[in-house]
């Protein structure tokens, strides 16, 4: 979560230790090299990966850590070997790759697409979940889940949302446009959908039973896991009977990511976001951990990091 202020000077907010508490920092960056693109950051999305890095959950952090990987900005300078991006255009940066933002895709809405968007879009395309009239189940309704619902409806699918929280029903049906809502803890509701779904996208990271969902798939149904539960358990029968497919996915390649951005712009598929100043970053992280956001925080870097 940083913004370049000069060719050799940057400002941002960083964590100094595993507490993850963020505070202002100034640091130097190298001059633009032959293959580099220098941007002035305008917006940055907030996701759980920022918690992982700042709090050293994988024991590989090197402090200070300046988090943020859903970055949008304006090109300030490019190296002599860079020909795809010109000074002044808007682009997105994700894990060292740059993508051009379509003119009709607002920058603050583009940021979360680089994580929540591409994470669900990739397996949906890989498993041909873009066939109008087919049925899709989305497990979990957070940053990832709400994007799966939006993509599913744009593809012409009949979308059912599964959640442990009944409070999300109105949001799923009235705001996101899902066709059905199921309280996953209700055994009767679950059994009523046996052999009814063509596809499942599982976005839930907390531990949850997998097998009950496997029995909801039709013959040749596909189950894509994009969350990170601590373990996965289901019987061989639940996948073998019906010749179903179970796979995992985490992100997408450069071609698929650019394709997704163009698709979102053309179909006005926008994530639901809450815009915040960078000074609110610590509170946003805590709210994220408490699942108190609909459905993604986006930091207004341009107007708050001075």
Image (cartoon, helix red, strand yellow):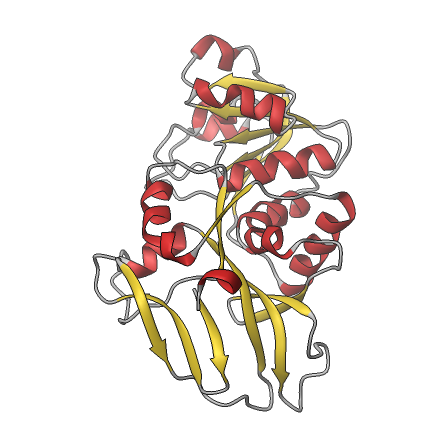
Q: Which of the 4 image quarters holds residue 52? A: bottom left
Is residue 282 shown above or below 221? Answer: below
In the image, farthest residue toward the top: 188
Q: Does residue 9 appear left or right of residue 239 in this picture?
A: left
The residue shown at (75%, 59%) is: 103
Task: Report whether residue 101 is seen.
Answer: yes
Residue 272 placed where, x, y %?
A: 57, 40
Q: Does residue 243 appear left or right of residue 167 in this picture?
A: right
Residue 202 placed where, x, y %?
A: 50, 36
Quarter of the image with the C terminus in it: bottom left
Task: Report whether residue 218 is seen.
Answer: no
Residue 283 placed where, x, y %?
A: 33, 47
Quarter of the image with the N terminus in it: bottom left
Is residue 216 shown above or below 264? Answer: above
Total numbered circles: 0
Give the camera-side residue of 8 and 217.
8
Q: Does residue 278 appear left or right of residue 111 in this picture?
A: left
Is residue 234 shown above or below 96? Answer: above
Q: Which of the 4 image quarters holds residue 164? A: top left
The residue shown at (69%, 75%) is: 88
Q: Which of the 4 image quarters holds residue 170? A: top right
The residue shown at (37%, 40%) is: 229
Give the camera-side residue of 81 and 108.
108
The residue shown at (57%, 55%) is: 111
Residue 45 placed where, x, y %?
A: 49, 54
């Amino acid at each position: 979560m940083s913004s370049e202020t000069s060719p050799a000077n940057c400002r941002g907010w960083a964590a100094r230790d595993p507490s993850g508490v963020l505070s202002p920092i100034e640091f130097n960056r190298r001059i633009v090299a032959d293959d580099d693109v220098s941007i002035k950051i305008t917006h940055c999305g907030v996701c759980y990966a920022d918690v992982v890095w700042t709090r050293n959950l994988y024991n590989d952090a090197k402090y200070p850590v300046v988090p943020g990987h859903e970055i949008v900005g304006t090109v300030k300078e490019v190296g002599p070997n860079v020909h795809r991006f010109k000074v002044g255009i808007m682009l997105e940066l994700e894990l060292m790759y740059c993508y051009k933002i379509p003119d009709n895709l607002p920058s603050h809405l583009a940021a979360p697409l680089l994580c929540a968007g591409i994470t669900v879009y990739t397996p949906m395309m890989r498993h041909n979940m873009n066939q109008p009239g087919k049925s899709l189940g989305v497990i979990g309704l957070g940053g990832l889940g709400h994007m799966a619902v939006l993509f599913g409806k744009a593809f012409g699918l009949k979308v059912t949302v599964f959640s442990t929280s009944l409070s999300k029903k109105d949001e799923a049906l009235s705001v996101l446009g899902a066709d059905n809502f199921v309280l996953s803890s209700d055994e009767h509701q679950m059994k009523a959908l046996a052999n009814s779904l063509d596809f499942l996208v599982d976005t839930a990271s907390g531990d949850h039973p997998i097998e009950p969902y496997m029995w909801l798939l039709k013959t040749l149904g596909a189950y894509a896991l994009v969350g990170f539960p601590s373990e996965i358990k289901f019987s061989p029968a639940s996948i073998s009977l019906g010749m179903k497919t179970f796979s995992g996915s985490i992100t997408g390649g450069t071609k698929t990511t650019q394709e997704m951005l163009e698709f979102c712009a053309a179909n006005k598929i926008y994530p639901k976001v809450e815009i915040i100043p960078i000074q609110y970053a610590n509170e946003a992280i805590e709210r994220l951990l408490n699942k108190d956001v609909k459905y993604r925080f986006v930091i207004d870097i341009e107007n708050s990091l001075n």
